[in-house]
Every structure is written in C-alpha cells, then in structure tokens.
Image: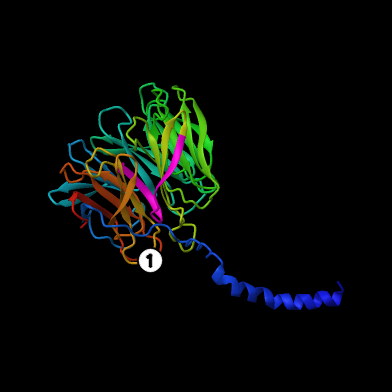
Amino acid sequence: MSARSQLILLLVLVPAIPLLAWASRPYLAPRKPEPDIFSGGKAYPPSELAFTKQAIGPEPTGLPLITNVQVVDEDGDGQNEILVCDASLNQITVYRRQGEEWNEEVLIPLVSAPAHVTPVDADGDGDLDMVVSVLGNIMPDDSVIGRVELFERTDSGFERHVILDNVRRIADVQPGDFDQDGDIDFAVAEFGYSRGAVRWLQNEGDFQYRDHELLNAPGTIHVPVADYDGDGDLDIAAIVSQDEEELWAFENAGDGTFTPRRLWFTINLDLGSAGLVSADLDSDGDQDLILPAGDNLEDFDAYPQPYHGCYWFENKGDWTFEMKRISDLGGTYAAAAGDLDGDNDIDVALVSMTNDWYTPGTASVVWLENDGEQNFTSWQIASDPIHLVTVAIGDINGDSRLDVLAGALNFRKPYERVGRVSAWLGQQKGGAK
C-alpha cells in the first residue's frame, strides 16, 4: 500500500472508530462500575443493644489529645476507675466514680506525650505500679526522645524510675515474666518514625533492666503478650506499620530467648495498621490477634478507604494465623474485645479517627456482634464525638454490664463534635441512646 493510500485509510479510521464504538454501545454488556475509592464503611444500623452516652470529666476545652483510655481497679477498692493518657496536658489522669459523677485526679504529672499506661505490680509488693510509654512528641519525630518510665506506688505517691532511655518514641509497653525467673519483665514497642524496634527489658532487680532488641523496624505500635503457641511460656506479638506493614511474633523458648516469626505482611503500604489486640475471639482456647486498620494521617485529607476496617487473625496452631476481615469501618483506629451482649461470645468495639466527618451520621463508635460462629454484624453506637483513637471495654458503673469507653485526639479537620473522654453505658436490647 502506497503512502498516499495509508494516509487516506488513516483519515477514514480516525473518525470512524469512535463512531462505531458509540453506535455499538446498546449491544455491548455494561462495564462493571469501578468501586468508589472512598468506599470504606461510613454508617451502620443503630445498635439493638442500648447504650447511654455519658461524658467523663469536664467539658472539653481547646482540642484535647487523648492517646489511651483504660478501665481498671487502680486503687484496689473493688470498683473500676478510668485511666487516661493526656498528651495535650502531658499527664496521666484517673477518674473515680462518686454516685453519678466522675472526680478527676492527676495521677502522674509531667510525662512528655504519654502514649500508653500499663498498670502492673512491677515490684511484687501487692499494689499496682504504672509503666508509661513515653512518646516525647505526639507528631512524627525520629529524634531520641522516647522513654519507658516506671512509677512505683509508695505510701506518699508515685516514685519515677526511668527504665529505658536514649531511644526513639515509645508507643507501648506490656508486662510478662519472659525468662520465668519469678519477676516482671517488659515488651516494648519503639515506634520512632523511620527508625524503631521491638525490645524486651529483662528485670535484674532494684528497678534495673537489661535491654534486648528483637527486631529493628520502624513504626511498631503495640506488643500484646500471650502464650500464642500454648507451650506454657509467654510470647510477644507486634504490629509494624511503617515501610512494609507486617505482623510479627517472637516465640519464647522459655528462658527469654526469642525466635522471630513474620506471620503476615501486605504489599498495600497504605493499609494503615493502627494497633494490635490479643483475644480468644473464637473461644477455642488459644489467643488470636485483632488488627484495626485505618490510619491515613500522613494524607493531607484523610478519608475512609475500601481496605480500612478490622482484621481478625485466627490462631490455627503451629504459628499459622488466618486473616479474615470482620469490619469495613472507615478510619478504624482502635479495637477492644469483650462480651458486650452477655451471650458468652467475644464481641469487638471499634472507633474511627478519620471517617467521612463531613457527612452527618457517620459512625465514630461501632460494635461487632459475634453470633458464636464468628460472623460479625456491625452496629452503630455513636457518631459524636469524632476523631477517636482509643477504646476500652469494662464495667465502669458497677451494674455488671460492660460499657464502652473512648478517647479523642483532635488535631485534624473538621474541628467539631469535639470530645475528650466519653463512655457509652451498656443497657439492654432495644436501640441506642
């Protein structure tokens, strides 16, 4: 074909092809629509299990930065208190119930951006001491500003012991006798930013600890401790959220010698792992792992993503964990496990940090009802307050029903529906309040 013929053919085909495609559209099967890129779950049916909302403490002023809430009998009087890590005021607060009111007390002042407080009898004297995970800076920072501070309870208050220093930001510390010598050691999540680690601190007595590094990896969030392989000693699990997002376990030989095992990883570097919880979700006698995923705070505008939600890693034995997605809540940031409806199955409470807050009614607190076969139904508890990053389950009012407690970290738009510490008191089936 001559060059001239080729040119004529090209001039004919250029308009003809799109015209033919347009004409043939009625005869072609419709193309499956692309999924909405912001298709993470936003709202759910109102909970059939009723909850009554109650603010804990005074009305929030400014933009509170609550990093951790817990339900615990802090003073041993048989009644649960509420422990709160406040990164805006740099302190640990306890709330004690007096009738229908909650009295606030600063338990530990002058802690630089506390991420987590762990109540434990660290010195074996029969009372609860406090171990604090010190970030040093709530914002991304790779400086050597992290600490583990152990506050020994004494007759006159708490005495501070720095048991790990010269490290990057610490996000979590959990206790366990890893070398089985009768005293309490600690697993440590050094989050850092682009550099971090998983560590364990070996108790050498008199508040002295030897530091052992188990993994060099940035963004370690939580280190739940349990006997994951059922051999009678305590192992450590860890979720690593920077670089590749990975789930690790460290198998204990019984003497504090650990074998690292990577249980899972994802090529989705934006999954947004936000924590890790140990619980026997299927009540089969071993410990599973629960992963809330929805941290996309590195984005200028954070939206719910289709892969956000809650993932259950079922312990199948022999260090095999099978992943199942049990919720699609957008911006999921924290999870807690407990039998919320009293049917002897373990349910899950979730809170969201970055859901679609510009749409009214978007869920900030949900609970996942376990039907006993590990089929989970999502029920909405609340849409106010928003920006929630920590959740706990426990009986805070002494009525033998489990309640849901959450804390808000308010440093992203929109600056509305601002909360600090909020509770939803468990009632009975019949609708949320």
Q: Is residue 10 left or right of residue 410?
A: right
Q: Which residues are magenta?
A: 321-337
Residue 178 x/y as whole percent: 41, 26
Please report the residue visible at 40 percent of the width from the left and 56 percent of the height from the top: 330
- Magenta-colored stretch includes residue 327: yes
Please report the residue visible at 68 percent of the width from the left and 76 percent of the height from the top: 16
Residue on which the image places disc 1: 414
Residue farthest left in this picture: 99
Q: Is residue 167 left or right of residue 276?
A: right
**Amino acid type, callout 1:** Pro
Q: How many marks?
A: 1
Image vertical order of residue 38 relative to residue 242, above or below: below
Q: Is residue 191 left or right of residue 393?
A: right
Residue 261 x/y as whole percent: 51, 33
The N terminus sits in image quarter: bottom right
Residue 114 x/y as whole percent: 37, 47
Residue 86 x/y as whole percent: 33, 51
Residue farthest right in this picture: 2
Image vertical order of residue 75 relative to residue 10, above or below: above
**Visible residue check, residue 80:** yes
The C terminus sits in image quarter: bottom left
**Visible residue check, residue 108:** no
Question: Which secondary structure class fits the magenta region best?
Answer: strand
